[in-house]
Amino acid sequence: MNRSLTTLSALVSLTAVSLASAQGYAPQPGYAPQGQQQPGYPPQPGYPPQPGYAPQPGYAPQPGYAPQPGYAPQPGYAPQGQQQPGYAPQPGYAPQAVAPATPYRTAPEMGELYVTSVVYGVGMGAWVSTEIGSSDPALVLIPPAILGIAAPIGAYFLDRPTMREGVPSAISAGLLLGAGEGIGIAATQMVTASSEHAWGFRGLARATALGATVGGVGGWAAGTFLRPTPMTSSMAISGAAWGTAIGSMLAYGSTPGSSSYGAANDTTSIGGLVGYNLGAAASAVIGATARPSPYQLAWMWGGAGIGAAASTPVFLLYVGSDSPARRGFLFMGTATTVGIIAGGLFSGVGGGLRTAEVPTRSARKLASIDMILPIIQKDQVGVSLAGTLQ
């Protein structure tokens, strides 16, 4: 009886092994059949474990992700967005640098300040020499020599740390505009006052030195707090020059023909001083809002020159006329103004200044020429232009 039971048990075991071999399935150690929980492995919600799949130690499937049967993650694998353990970037690889929000001044801009500071130092030295009142050449030349070197040295230390873009240009413009203001005030005083009350050279030196100093401080404050671009400063200086010329033309042309040249010069000086300030202020606003490029500024200067030159023949019309010839300056001042405006419009006022850190804006043009074609007919030769008005 016992032998029969032993034989029957052996037959059952052999049959089980044969069925398992026929299906090609060998149970893995620690494998739990479907429907049973794997020891130490929490199944994800809605994730049915695949038959024959055993997760690797420490690996947790993502929610909603069903691994393929027989798939095992590679050792050391980390999901996207996480750093690989022991991973070192390739040699020579560097992340892309982000441009700073506040750009620094350029070398040409700082060079402009150095040149302007030398002129300012020499001028201040000349003023000191006039106040000393010495006739000794050595004593007269010492203050300009010392201050002419001290001023650029001061600009060097002012650039430590490096100044923001536009600040050196604003200081240079302030020095020049302040000096011009002082010269204009002194010149107007000397031509309008009597000879015994005129300031003279000492008063001119004082006004120039004081105006340049105040202008330099004001330029530094404007550059630091208002943050103008270098072209804004260039526009202010250009506008001051245009305003002086146009104001002088209009003022002189408006004087009566019966007035003496001395009286006409008084009016002309006052008109030039008023035009100086109006031109500088208006151009600074245009430079800060429209942001013209150097190309456009050059066109505006060209327009001013063309307008002034093209209006010169108006004086020939006064030959034999009863009207005073100085009236022609009214037309010249108007033509110069129109030339400046036309040069700015046709070159595209509204374009932006371009630096390495500041985003650019494409320039807008009032008109552009797109095509030039020759026209050849039986007895005529000409040129055809095709363009766009914007």
Image (cartoon, grey):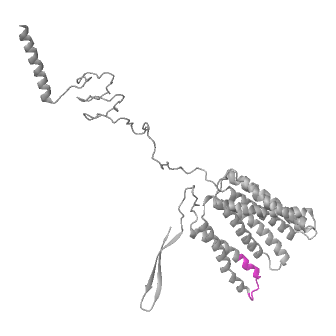
Residue drawn at (80%, 70%) of the image:
269
Would you say residue 9 sits in the magenta stretch?
no
Which one is in front, 184 or 33? 33
Up-down relation of residue 338 to residue 37 (above or below): below
| Residue at the extreme bottom of the image, as rendered | 379
Q: Position of residue 378 (x, y in %)?
A: 41, 91
Camera sees residue 300 = yes
Residue drawn at (79%, 60%) of the image:
149
From the viewer's perspective, tell me whether residue 258 is left or right of residue 284: right
How many marks overall? Answer: 0
Q: Position of residue 256 (x, y in %)?
A: 80, 77
Q: Which residues are magenta?
A: 319-330
Q: Quadrant of residue 358?
A: bottom right
Q: Position of residue 346 (x, y in %)?
A: 57, 70
From the viewer's perspective, tell me whether residue 345 is left or right of residue 46: right
Q: Quadrant of residue 334?
A: bottom right
Which one is in front, 281 or 222? 222
Which one is in front, 167 or 184? 167
Up-down relation of residue 37 to residue 256 (above or below): above
**Quarter of the figure with the N terminus:** top left
